[in-house]
Image: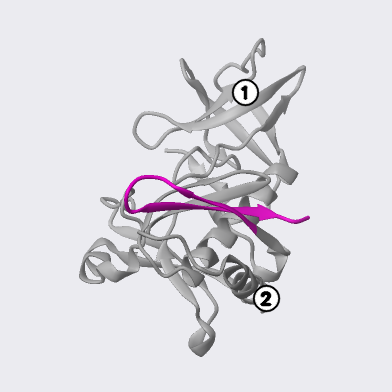
Amino acid sequence: MTRMLFRDDAYRSEAPATVTEVAEGGVALDATLFYPRGGGQPGDCGRLVWAGGEMAVADTVKGAGAAILLVPAEGATPPPPGTAVVQHLDWNRRHRHMRVHTALHLLSVVIPLPVTGGAIGAEKGRLDFDMEEAPEDKAALQEALNALIARDLPVTEDWITDDDLAANPGLVKTMSVAPPTGQGRVRLIRIGQGDAQVDLQPCGGTHVARTGEIGPVRLGKIEKKGRQNRRVNLHLET
């Protein structure tokens, strides 16, 4: 099982590791900074460096069981099992994913409707809502969203048991993707604390530490995606 360093510290961009396996889908390490594709968030990229060699990482995916695989860029030669490597994360790209991801959690606050899908990018993201009609005042939604961001609320994690989640189905906002269960516990992302809490929902992705780090955002197109689905696009302004 790969230790998920990105879960311990989403801000860490460099770390040592040892290659445990070179599989058909990529390179497995004993501990990884690289987030694997999932929950609408892209896999991380970067590079591995070792004595006498280097491999560009084009993507990161989930392998069999609990494995996390770093996908070599085209033409790159993976290090053999047992090699001590240093991981170098493409931090700028990851940090932009973190900003967009947290902004999308806040978008689900200003549009308090069930979420039917979503995607995260380095420049923009989107959520699909179970929404029959498009919002009447997009400018007001954007203003409310940027006001939440500007409050610079703390973003923290908590853990609950699978049973606790089953007893509190209202925590789950997504209709299309169920939170990962079966490990005995589920990670929650909390935005705000105490009376200032604005959101709490299951999530396995990476997030900024405070909402102010997101910076200003702009709401883009609101697209019709089926009879009762509306896609709301969100863009980072900086």
Judged from the image, the secondary structure of the residue bearing numbered disc 2 is: loop
Q: Residue at x 57, y 70 (%)?
A: 141
Inspect this view and state whether residue 10 appears.
Answer: no
Q: From what the image shows, is residue 237 above or below residue 146?
A: above
Magenta stretch containing residue 233, yes or no? yes
Say which quarter of the image contains residue 234.
bottom right
Q: Main secondary structure of the magenta part?
A: strand
Magenta stretch containing residue 144, yes or no? no
Q: Which residue does the numbered mark 2 point to in the structure image?
A: 152
Is 169 on the left-hand or right-hand side of 155? Answer: left
Judged from the image, the secondary structure of the residue bearing numbered disc 1 is: loop
Q: From what the image shows, is residue 84 above or below residue 33?
A: above
Say which quarter of the image contains residue 71.
top right
Q: Residue at x 64, y 33 (%)?
A: 45
**Does label 1 or label 2 sit earlier along the sequence?**
1
Label at residue 83: 1
Give the residues in magenta: 219-238
Q: Residue at x 33, y 48 (%)?
A: 177
